[in-house]
Amino acid sequence: MSSKPVLTTISPITQKAIHTRDEFGPDDIPAVVEASKKAFASFKASYNLEARQKLVTKALDILESKAESLAHDLTEQMGRPIQYCAKEIKTAVLRGRYMLKVSSEALKDIPGDEEAGFTRYIRKEPLGSVLVIFAWNYPYLILVNSLVPALLAGNALILKPSPQTPTVPETFLSVLKEAGLPDDVVQVIHCGNPDTLSKLIATPGISSVTFTGSVVGGLAAQQAASKRIIPVGLELGGNDPAYIRSDVDIKWAAEEIVDGAVFNSGQSCCSIERVYVHQDIYDKFVDEVVGVVKNYKLGDPFTGASHLGPVISVKSAQNIRKHIDDALKSGAKSLTPDVFQEGEALGETFVRPEILVNVDHNMQVMKEETFGPVIPIQKVSSDQEAVQLMNDSDLGLTASIWTRDITTGEKLADSVEAGTVFVNRADYPSPDLAWTGWKNSGRGQTLSRFGFDQFVRLKNFHLKQVPS
């Protein structure tokens, strides 16, 4: 029996233990880092870009073939209704294939200006050993964002998942091995101790860190790397606003907003967290949102009939309800119908969709990331007021504007402080566009051809021909 500390994964559905893993500790750091360094050197020498592309292509094909069978594990570990889980894996494969498609162009040498007697160019070199720390809420999608471009660029990787979804990187490692990946080019560690992670980040031999998770966690990763000169990529939280202009199709917009706010029980960095509605349609829009929410079902995520399952943990449920209670005590009103009592009876983690009106920016639910199925709706009198409120946040991941007038929507979007601005869409990272956060929502980017940039360093070649 192992003498190591053990990490236990608790099912958000039953509150019972479903997985245990030996915890990576400080004494494990030297061996893992050294193995990664050696594997990187061999991988760089033996696998050119074409070979890496073939390997990743085969691995993605294998992963896609397993999508349906992997859905059960994902539902069990993070509570999302099972009918949606295979789609996450298939979408992750599509993202990976897009990164494959653009990798040759993104990683090619860049020639310098022509000059007689000289050859000059810029080469994009891999960094070395990349530590990838990633969250549980969309674990396959989040991991693909870093793993595929980092591996295609020629790096070795150390993957540190959330303790809530330990099997996800293990599955990736398995399919990569099946595709022919050499030993230790990708390693998986399980760690729940922030001090251990800080020591790992501070260890010479770790060449880069990418972190996806909370702002607090990202700041800790940044602090751990502060005495080293290494890149730290951060994909952090969001408090993403939506503005509904008076010219929209109210029924359509209500359906879109509810889906963007409560899908995955609102546990998405880019879910809609606050809604601003023009006063001319405010009452009708609110009524329509209530009607849409009535048709949602909160329940057992394994039945195939539930739209919403539990949130990830009791602690998360308590934080969501704390935000709701703060709003109610400050004058907000709940419009949530009583149709979710059966679902709520399943346990503390089964949090009902909550519609809040009479909200303002003195309330936590409008100022902080709630990360739950909550739709706070505030009335505004003009486009200018809406944009001002949308920008009244220290987070800036995504934002959306809903209007029939695309020209005006684009102009308003240009004034919104966020890494991605949507018009008539929300909650959709496009693989061909850079995924990046403004303000405290992050630093660096994934996806698109720019998604390779944080996994390479530039090396200039300056060659002068010697006269014969």
Image: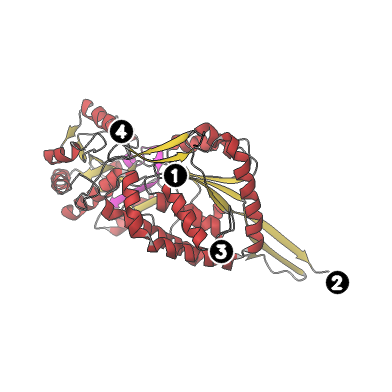
Q: Please indicate whether residue 438 sits to the left or right of residue 180 in the image.
A: left
Q: Is residue 460 above or below residue 310?
A: below
- The quarter of the image holding the C terminus is bottom right
Label 2: few (<14), some or many (≥20) within 10 Å?
Answer: few
Instruction: Tell me if residue 372 can be seen.
Output: yes
- Residue located beneath label 3 in the image: 52
Q: Amino acid at mark 3?
A: Arg
Give the SS element for disc 1. Answer: strand
- Residue located beneath label 2 in the image: 467
- Residue located beneath label 1 in the image: 438
* Magenta-highlighted residues: 388-402
Q: How far is the residue under mark 4 from the one under mark 3?
A: 42 Å
Q: Amino acid at mark 1?
A: Trp
Label 1: few (<14), some or many (≥20) within 10 Å?
Answer: many
Q: Please indicate whether residue 364 sits to the left or right of residue 158 in the image.
A: left
Give the SS element for disc 3. Answer: helix
Question: What residue occupies the far right of the structure in this picture?
Answer: 468
For discs 1 and 4, the disc positioned in front in the rendered view: 4
